[in-house]
Structure formats: structure tokens, C-alpha cells
Amino acid sequence: MGMDLTLFMVDWGRLGTAPVECRIGLLEDIAWPWGPGESYGPGRGRADGWLWPPGPEPAWCAVYSFFTTNGAHAPHVRAGSAWADMRSLLDVFVREPMDTFLDGLVRDAGPAFAAGGGFFPPAVDPWHRRVLLACPPEVLPGKARAWERVEPRLEELREPFAAECGDWAGRPDTFEDFIALLREWGDVTTTAAHRGWGLVGLP
């Protein structure tokens, strides 16, 4: 069984009031909190993919359910590998904003980025990364702007995808799958940037 990705949109200030060592646990309690009879409840899972926790208190985070991945982490890794393969075939006006957009989401941007620059505790077990991605709020407006620049030019990725990724193991199954996942990330980053919240991915 492969690793899953649970993606949260988070009020960074609210989460930051908790001790560092408790922050992952707080998010896990939001994603998998329930005692008997508890659930997200009717109307909480929305057609836009965001699931808001139940209860009368103002929500300080939400979980995003990807339509294109069934919760698995592997499609995001495959998308990152696909972009790495094809990026040299595209002009700088596509390559640079796409790099900005994807780095740290589906492309590894290094352990400091993954741990949110110390916002989360480091993984103790090197075989199990406790945080798969962490995008603080200040990073997301730049990603949203990069997405605005690159979205109208997505069709330009079709030929490079066919040349470098088509029918390759460990790459998205089709160009349409690849673009659908990019569009979901575009929606996620735009929504989080609009709220001024961050993104956190847990396995």
C-alpha cells in the first residue's frame, strides 16, 4: 500500500499558538478526530473539495480532498517527475512560473521547506517524513501569481509531455491527468492565498 497525502489549509497564526511538538497532532485530530457518532456532517464536504470540521467554533483549517488522486501521494510525485523531465523543452516564460508554482508542492524543495522552516518538528525516523509539505502563508501569493501566469499556457506542455513522459512508468498516465492535477493545485493555492492561510501535507 502506498503513502497517502492529506492536505490541510491552515490558519498559520492559530496553529502557531500551539507548541511546535503539538502542531502535527492538532492537524491529525482535525483529519481523523472522531469518537462515536462524530463526522464532518452534512453540508461540510463541499463540491469544491474542501472539508470543514464540524462544530460551532470558527474553523481554523480545512482538509482538501483531491478529485484526481483518491488520496494517494504517488500521483503528486509522478507529476513532479513529469515536470522535471519536460521543463527544459519549454521557454523561460513557462518554465520559471511553473517552477515557482510547483516547487514544494509536487517538487521537493528540500527539508527546510518541507518542515516549514522549523514550524513543525523534524522527523525523528528518516524513513517516515511526518510532514510531506509545508507552505507558509507568505509563500502562497507568489504561487498563486505564478499559476495565473502559466494557466493560459498549459496546452504548450502537451508536446513536451508526449516527448518525455508519455507511456513512461512513474509518470502520469495521460496529459489530461497531469493537467487536471495541476488545476487542482492551482485552485488550492489560490484559495489559500486569498484567505492568507498556509498549506500542510501529512502522510
Image (cartoon, grey):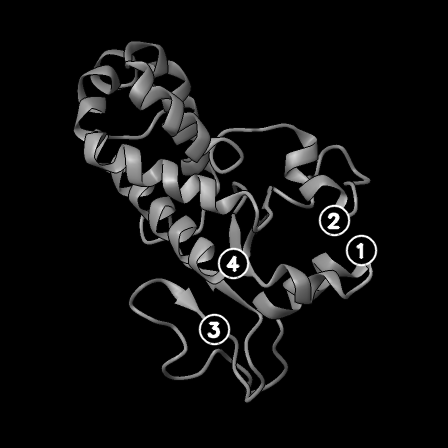
On the image, numbered disc 2 is attached to which residue? 120
88 w.r.t. 68: above or below: above
Residue in the foreground of this view, choosing between 130 and 52: 52
Separation (CA) of disc 1 from disc 4: 20 Å
On the image, numbered disc 1 is attached to which residue? 20
Position in image of residue 50 (x %, y %): 40, 65
Comes first in the chain, label 4 or label 2: 2
Comes first in the chain, label 1 or label 3: 1
Residue in the foreground of this view, choosing between 107 and 125: 107
Q: Residue at x 36, y 81 (%)?
A: 43
**Left or right: 67 in relation to 78:** left
On the image, numbered disc 4 is attached to which residue? 196
Separation (CA) of disc 2 from disc 1: 6 Å
Residue in the foreground of this view, choosing between 15 and 13: 13
Q: Nearer the viewer, mark 4 or mark 2?
A: 4
Secondary element under disc 2, as helix, strand or loop, is loop
Q: Quadrant of residue 110?
A: top right
